Image: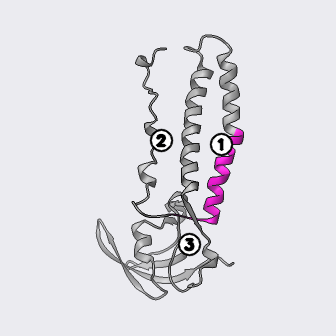
């Protein structure tokens, strides 16, 4: 089928990093050792397992003749582009990563990258978050990016401090109840 009839292009406009994970200009890509390992494992799986499997399916499908109506070929090529895009993204992220081991933090009474912070707001609601790298963040699991507004408000605070968090709903005060780091 001619490219004129399909919503695809040969351009690699997807080569750019997703905006939700973009790092502020001039900042480093901090990452915990676990986060680095997880991204590296995903990269190795894509390169050594998934990609070769998809390549063999596409090769087999291409050998069957007419490619224009061959679902295995069309889907395989699309999946191959997705895998290659993810491989490029992971490679760039891992190359720019600066791995920080929170267990080695000497100043354990103050909030820095890798800290797990237990805090409460003025309504008495308590939260526990761990400050991690941009690519490791899972807010619903309590893992927030070090560039998030909450993390920025918490950084450099100590147990017992009250910090100010600016939100779209207004200013909120947070009481730091506990600061923990993983054991070395």
Q: Earlier in the sequence, mark 2 or mark 3?
A: 2
* Residue picked out by circle 2: 15
| The quadrant where residue 102 appears | bottom right
Query: Magenta segment, which residues?
Result: 29-49
The residue lying at 67 percent from left, 29 percent from top is: 55
Q: Secondary structure at mark 1?
A: helix
Q: Secondary structure at mark 2?
A: helix
Examine the rendered structure and indicate whether residue 51 appears above or below residue 151. above
**Does 34 lie within the magenta span?**
yes
Q: Secondary structure at mark 3?
A: loop
Examine the rendered structure and indicate whether residue 184 appears above or below residue 41. below
Residue 184, position in %: x, y?
Answer: 69, 78
Rounded to the nearest angstrom, the CA distance separating label 2 from label 1 is 17 Å
Q: Earlier in the sequence, mark 1 or mark 3?
A: 1
Q: How many tags in the picture? A: 3
Q: What label does residue 114 carry, if any?
A: 3
Rounded to the nearest angstrom, the CA distance separating label 2 from label 3 is 29 Å
| The quadrant where residue 45 appears | top right
Residue 109, position in %: x, y?
Answer: 54, 86
């Amino acid at each position: 089928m001619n490219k004129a009839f399909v919503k695809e292009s040969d351009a690699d406009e997807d080569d750019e990093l997703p905006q939700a994970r973009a790092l502020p200009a001039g900042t480093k890509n901090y990452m915990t050792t676990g986060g680095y390992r997880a991204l590296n494992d995903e990269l190795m799986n894509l390169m050594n397992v998934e990609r070769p499997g998809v390549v063999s399916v596409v090769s087999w499908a291409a050998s069957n003749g007419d490619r224009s109506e061959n679902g295995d070929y069309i889907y395989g090529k699309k999946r191959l582009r997705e895998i290659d895009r993810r491989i490029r993204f992971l490679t760039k992220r891992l190359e720019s990563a600066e791995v920080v081991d929170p267990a080695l933090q000497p100043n354990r009474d103050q909030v820095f990258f890798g800290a797990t912070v237990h805090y409460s707001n003025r309504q008495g609601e308590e939260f526990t978050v761990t400050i991690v790298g941009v690519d490791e963040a899972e807010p619903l699991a309590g893992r927030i990016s070090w560039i998030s507004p909450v993390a920025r408000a918490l950084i450099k605070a100590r147990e017992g401090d009250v910090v100010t968090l600016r939100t779209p709903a207004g200013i909120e005060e947070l009481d730091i109840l506990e600061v923990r780091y993983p054991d070395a």
